Image (cartoon, rainbow, N blue to C red):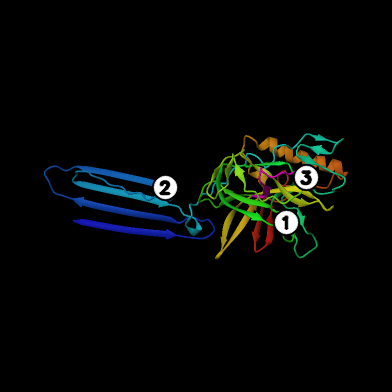
Amino acid sequence: MKKIFLSILILSSCGGSSDVVSVQDTTTTTVQDTTTTTVQDTTTTTVQDTTTTTVQDTTTTTVQDTTTTTVAHSGGGMINNDEPPLLMNLLILNWGPYDPSTGVSGDFEFREDMPLTYFDEFGRVHSPGTSYAYDNPTFEYKVPRDTQVYIPINGFVDFFTWQPTGSYKQDDWEIMIKPTRGSNWTLVIDHVVALSCDRSINVVCDDPLTINGIQLTNGMQVEAGDLLGYVGNYEDGEGGTFGRTEIAIGEYVMNGNQRDFNNYCPTNYLHESVKSSIQASVNQIMASYESWKGDSSFYDESNMVAPGCWYSEIYESNGKTTPKK
């Protein structure tokens, strides 16, 4: 007598949720013989985006084989890797110390002729009082044009594009890096130009980005600490161009048929080996700017959820931002 029972349970949802497929195949065969032997073999295998086949060759009177396989998928058929990348740096490496006699703190240079916010923290309202107001979902730095930018994580180039100047000054590149090819997590580096560009002259340079002398391509593997290029461009208000770059970390979230992006506070996603030193550097640059500006309450650090962050996350959908403590 042969009895086969097949049960398939499929759970699916959008926005990075996992699809779990459980298959249970129980086969029982009984043969009457002078010798009775019972062997029970139970195997449980859990894999990610993997097809597992179990073949059993056993000479027995009664054999019971139960195999359970679980495969996790994310929305859109990508591997659902919910582990966020941990940052080894925040694009720039030199944060200080601050010299009040020069207004210089590492790669930052506070200048009287350019009264800018040189470090725009995560959650600072941009374009306040207008219909275009939004909560800044990045760490944004305004630094000299020859400041170098370094890749913060190990991963794969998922996307990059040249950004010509439109409603505001750009003429620089944006690049997105994923920790694994199918991850929903993404690191965004906005405003960077190639190492071959001469940053001593104020001209548009659209040379391709290179890493270790190799031109950037989609799918290219990169490592934390790789030198990517120079900071991009920012209008200084005096007819010239200063430097600017931004870092964001977040994950794609399905909202019906629409793919939104949820940004997270960068200083909450630092690798443990650099966490304390980089968080201290962020606190130091805010305190130094306040000292230079003569306004000790400019950043209001005591109300931040982490160094440089007003919120733990900022959700972006249709150009609108929704912050969450």
Residue at the image point whose x is 23% and y is 52% from the top: 28
Residue 273 is situated, as x and y percent measured from the top left of the image, at: 62, 34
Spatial distance from mark 1 to mark 3, Cα to Cα?
17 Å
Vertical position of residue 186 compared to residue 93: above or below: below
- Determine if the magenta segment contains residue 193: yes
Part of the protein shown in magenta: 189-200
The residue indicated by pointer 3 is 301
Residue 48 is situated, as x and y percent measured from the top left of the image, at: 44, 49
Kind of residue at badge 2: Val
The image quarter in which residue 11 lies = bottom left
Residue at the image point whose x is 60% and y is 50% from the top: 176
In-image side of 196 versus 47 (left or right): right
Q: Secondary structure at mark 3?
A: helix
Spatial distance from mark 2 to mark 3, Cα to Cα?
44 Å
Residue at the image point whose x is 55% and y is 49% from the top: 217
- Determine if the magenta segment contains residue 126: no
Q: Which label is found at residue 47?
A: 2
How many discs appear?
Answer: 3
Q: Which label is found at residue 135?
A: 1
Residue at the image point whose x is 58% and y is 56% from the top: 252
Mark 3 crowd level (few <14, some 14–19, many ≥20, 10 Å Cα): some
Q: Which label is found at residue 276?
A: none
Q: Secondary structure at mark 1?
A: strand
The residue at the far left in this view is 34
Q: Earlier in the sequence, mark 2 or mark 3?
A: 2
Residue 215 visible in the shown view: yes
Spatial distance from mark 1 to mark 2, Cα to Cα?
39 Å
Kind of residue at badge 3: Glu
> Quick check: marks 1 and 3 in contact, CB under 8 Å?
no
Mark 2 crowd level (few <14, some 14–19, many ≥20, 10 Å Cα): few
